[in-house]
Amino acid sequence: MEDIKVRIIEDDAQQRIDKFLTKMLKQYSRTQIQNLIQDNHVKVNGKTIKASYKLEENDEVEIHFPEPENTDILPENIPLNIVYEDSDVIVVNKPTGMIVHPSIGIYTGTLVNALLFHCHDLSGINGVNRPGIVHRIDKDTSGLLMVAKNDLAHQSLSEQLQEHSVIRRYYALVHGLIPHEFGRIEAPIGRDQNDRQKMTCTDKNAKTAITNFKVIERFKDMTLVECRLETGRTHQIRVHMQYIGYPVYGDPQYGLKRDDTTYGQFLHAKILGFVHPRTHEDMYFDSKLPDFFKEKLEELRLEMK
């Protein structure tokens, strides 16, 4: 997880810092937060503090999330849907609900744990905690990911991502009827100052973000779109579609509260294309939508009859 900086507003003043951070970082327990503070990973105005510290208005809180220890990351016999594999790369179709790599407090059940069981020749460029991981998709997003088996492959694939030459197309079911056939969203994305767990379209501490979309199918009050990424910002499609008024169905952070989130968000990394790092062959993969996604589309089609 990226390091976080937050400035304390008047409403949050006089709270204990461990209580404040537990409320802000909902995925972590109070004990985990207190351990972060005890290990000097939390600073206020540049200084280490105790868990009992009471916040004051305009305090600047900085939270550093250390990488988990290598000894905590063990191979696990978790089934993988491998679309393609050779001596350099693996292309995996990740299911909804699976986290890509371990982070503080999360050491099991990730794609990395499964990959370590499947093979032992993964690249080490991203360190011992993210072997082979070139890029990520959200926990609740399903679809295609490329994994590097060696450093040569990792460097090549990373360069292609930086040059925006990797083909990444997602299918998203969104609320509302989009009237036009195509669209281009160019709005910088940065962390939401009011909710540090979210990203938002903003000019403050933001990075350029570009999403292209086209309409695939319209329903009664929803639209199926294909989104093509030119950049790879955190939560990019989810933030951009909410920004233009068409949030992703089932999105727990940016969607509508009434959504059924039993299966996760209806966002799937469907198409992935890149140049093979060794053979220089054009590689292109197209994955099927998850069953729950297909069933929802059929339900919406029946409503139209």
Image (cartoon, rainbow, N blue to C red):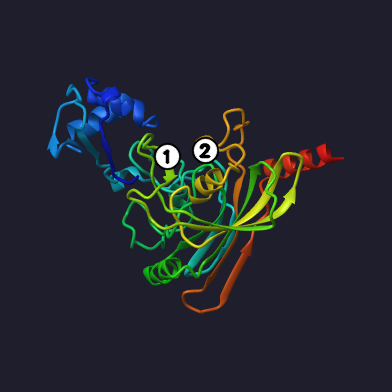
Residue at image coords 76%, 43%? 219
Residue at image coords 41%, 70%? 159
Q: Is residue 89 left or right of residue 179?
A: left
Q: Secondary structure at mark 2?
A: loop
* Residue at the extreme left: 47
The percent coordinates of residue 135 (x first, y second) are: 44, 57
Q: Is residue 187 above or below residue 38?
A: below
* Residue at the extreme right: 305
Which residue is identified by label 2?
A: 254
Q: Is residue 97 above or below residue 37?
A: below
Q: Return the disc, 2 or 1, that comes first in the chain's sequence.
A: 1
> Between 191 and 114, which is closer to the camera in this rendering?
191
Label 1: few (<14), some or many (≥20) within 10 Å? some
> Between 118 and 52, which is closer to the camera in this rendering?
52
Looking at numbered disc 1 in the image, what kind of residue is underneath it?
Answer: Lys
- Give residue 198's quadrant in the image: top left
Residue at image coords 45%, 66%? 161
| Image quarter (top left, top right, bottom left or bottom right) of the N terminus | top left
> Between 72 and 256, which is closer to the camera in this rendering?
256
Looking at numbered disc 2 in the image, what kind of residue is underneath it?
Answer: Tyr
Mark 2 vs 1: CB contact within 8 A: yes
Q: Is residue 62 above or below residue 53?
A: below
Which residue is identified by label 1?
A: 198
Q: How many marks?
A: 2
In three-dimensional space, the C-alpha distance between marks 2 and 1, rounded to whole angstroms, equals 8 Å
The percent coordinates of residue 26 (x first, y second) are: 39, 29
The percent coordinates of residue 256 (x first, y second) are: 58, 33
Q: Is residue 146 left or right of residue 180?
A: left
Residue at image coords 38%, 34%? 195
| Image quarter (top left, top right, bottom left or bottom right) of the C terminus | top right
